[in-house]
Image (cartoon, rainbow, N blue to C red):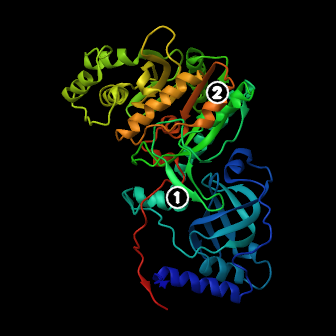
């Protein structure tokens, strides 16, 4: 089966062959030694100076005016104008490089390299006067470039989200402004690493394929290892392995982890996502709250030079200290109902009255989680800590030192969504086993997010795990906020998509 080529694609293939017929390799193997970018040229050049440059990029537009032409070159840093003169790039009698190659065989989207000198045009535009031009890559598909009419109206803009996410390589070329979110995302993780490394915490790696999934309430992806003849799971979290390292004597460990949860997709959820998990011995959740505030404030400063960031219609301020509510206080604040003393049956009835969907698989903890999610979470715009969760919601967190039935846990909520989760980690192996057993009972009732009982993890903490504070922070969601992105797909280069429908006609050879 071969694809039917469009007229433009056929023309480009003909040009490809003509280049080859002229002895020009349209995909040369040799190094092209670029020494500067378009942005650097504009920053460095001072009028009157001689600046020799070697630059490469895509040909994005062309204005041919007889024996001279202006064109626009786009590289990783932006765009710059180039000036191509026939008699300069073709010094002898043979003018093929200009008359045939540049004027007729090159197309918009082709990648070229140029050697030349920088100058300023009569209208004041910094440009490169080309001395040598080399074809580096022939583009066989036309770029979906937007067109601007005389009234300034843009036509044929590459804006369809599905096409943009599927063909991110095209999106980055024709909408270069989208790069900014991804550059900021990298700066975000670099800022976080710098913060944690300065505190001398060790960055580590733990298994992605796990014999038992754990560390969170979620459905896993399942796979099979032929040699070991056993089922394995893509990790939903790396918590239990990092805690094993704390047992082994590391006082501070962290990991930027790819995690996988076989759940619904939305503008806040992708089945594959990135978390940073941190575990520090001899600390508690109150200490961890202070660390999160300090770290996220630093990230905002590193990315934006200020703590206030515009996110949609909201101006969010990450300056410390952040507001704090207990879970019960938050629910009472937003619903007017105190649920702290309710049993499971009363709470189920209360949830129904509040318009929250309820099913028989839900225990007390799940009901509280649903009420909070439906009635409170979306209203928390400024960064806010929700603390002191009911024990039923947190099988890996330590029981509260003062309040019966609660655990030492917090989540940071910002712009209506959770961005991190943290505990004073449960290190009592007897209590931990009992909590796992309660999870097994919830699983029998139909809760497909209930945790499994991990005997090896229990064995590890039976050897003794020091008091530990643990944190999981969602990099994708934090990136959404820090880049003012509306969807998680906008901060993932290649978000997961449904199988592509074959929209290109095919024919049999």
Q: Is residue 485 above or below residue 102?
A: above
Kindly tell me whether residue 1 is visible in this rendering.
yes
Q: Residue furthest top?
A: 402
- Name the one closer to the observer, 260 or 359: 359
Disc 2 secondary structure class: helix
Disc 1 target residue:
168
**Quadrant of the rendered image containing residue 382:** top left
Q: Residue furthest bottom?
A: 509
Position in image of residue 387 (x %, y %): 45, 18
> Which residue position holds label 2?
461
Residue 491 percent location from the top left of the image: 51, 46
The location of residue 462, given as percent across then percent down, is: 65, 26
Q: Is residue 116 left or right of residue 283?
A: right
Picture quadrant of residue 104: bottom right
Whether 315 is drawn above or below 359: the answer is above
Residue in the image at 58% along x and 41% along y: 185
Foreground mark, 2 or 1, reads: 2
User: Badge 2: how crowded within 10 Å, few (<14), some, or many (20+)?
Assistant: many
Instruction: Determine the residue positioned at 53% across, 28% down.
Output: 433
Name which residue lies at 73% across and 71% down: 133
Observer able to see residue 188: no
Percent x, y of residue 40: 71, 48
In the rendered structure, find residue 369 and report the number of the disc placed on it.
none
Image quadrant in which you'd find residue 259? top right
Q: Nearer the viewer, residue 234 or 473?
A: 234
Q: Residue at x 41, y 58 (%)?
A: 162
Residue situated in front as seen by the camera: 352 or 387: 352
Q: How many marks?
A: 2
Question: Distance from label 2 to label 1 (Cα)?
Answer: 45 Å
Q: Observer-nearest residue: 172 or 54?
A: 172
Of the image marks 2 and 1, the number of the one nearer the N terminus: 1
Q: Residues within 10 Å of mark 1 (few under 14, many from 20)?
A: some
């Amino acid at each position: 089966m071969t694809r039917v080529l469009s007229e433009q694609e056929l023309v480009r293939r003909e040009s490809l062959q003509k280049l080859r017929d002229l002895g020009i390799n349209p995909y040369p193997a040799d190094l092209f030694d670029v020494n500067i970018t378009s942005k650097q040229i504009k920053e460095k050049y001072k009028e009157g100076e001689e600046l020799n440059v070697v630059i490469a990029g895509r040909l994005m537009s062309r204005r041919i005016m007889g024996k001279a032409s202006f064109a626009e070159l786009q590289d990783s840093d932006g765009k710059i104008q180039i000036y191509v003169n026939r008699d300069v790039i073709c010094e002898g009698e043979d003018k093929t490089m200009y008359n045939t190659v540049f004027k007729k065989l090159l197309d918009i989207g082709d990648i070229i390299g140029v050697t030349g000198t920088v100058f300023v045009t009569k209208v004041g535009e910094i440009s490169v006067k080309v001395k040598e031009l080399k074809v580096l890559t022939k583009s066989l598909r036309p770029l979906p470039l937007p067109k601007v009419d005389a009234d300034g109206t843009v036509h044929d803009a590459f804006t369809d989200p599905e096409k943009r996410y599927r063909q991110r390589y095209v999106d980055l070329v024709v909408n270069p402004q989208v790069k900014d979110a991804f550059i900021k995302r990298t700066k975000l993780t670099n800022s976080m690493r710098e913060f944690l490394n300065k505190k001398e915490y060790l960055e580590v790696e733990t298994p992605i394929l796990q014999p038992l999934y754990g560390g969170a309430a979620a459905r896993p992806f399942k796979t099979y290892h032929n040699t070991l003849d056993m089922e394995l799971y893509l990790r939903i979290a790396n918590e239990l392995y990092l805690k094993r390292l704390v047992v082994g004597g590391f006082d501070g460990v962290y990991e930027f982890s790819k995690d996988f949860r076989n759940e619904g997709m939305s503008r806040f959820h992708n089945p594959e996502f990135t978390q940073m998990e941190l575990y520090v011995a001899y600390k508690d959740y109150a200490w961890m709250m202070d660390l999160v505030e300090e770290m996220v404030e630093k990230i905002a400063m590193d990315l934006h030079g200020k703590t206030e960031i515009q996110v949609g219609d909201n101006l969010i301020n990450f300056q410390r200290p952040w507001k704090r509510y207990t879970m019960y206080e938050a629910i009472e604040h937003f619903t007017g109902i105190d649920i702290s003393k309710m049993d499971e049956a009363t709470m189920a009835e209360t949830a129904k009255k509040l318009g929250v969907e309820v099913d028989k698989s839900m225990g007390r903890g799940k009901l509280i989680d649903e009420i909070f999610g439906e009635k409170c979470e979306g209203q928390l715009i400024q960064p806010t800590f929700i603390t002191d969760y009911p024990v039923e919601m947190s099988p890996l967190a330590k029981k509260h030192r003062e309040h019966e039935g609660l655990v030492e846990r917090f989540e940071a909520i910002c712009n209506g969504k959770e961005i991190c989760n943290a505990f004073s980690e449960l290190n009592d192996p007897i209590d931990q086993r009992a909590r796992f057993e309660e999870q097994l009972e919830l699983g029998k009732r139909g809760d497909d997010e209930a945790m499994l009982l991990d005997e090896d993890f229990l064995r590890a903490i039976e050897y003794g795990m020091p008091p530990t504070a643990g944190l999981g922070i969602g990099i994708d969601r934090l990136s959404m906020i820090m880049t003012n992105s509306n969807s998680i797909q906008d901060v993932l280069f290649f978000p997961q998509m449904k199988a592509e429908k074959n929209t290109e006609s095919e024919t049999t050879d």
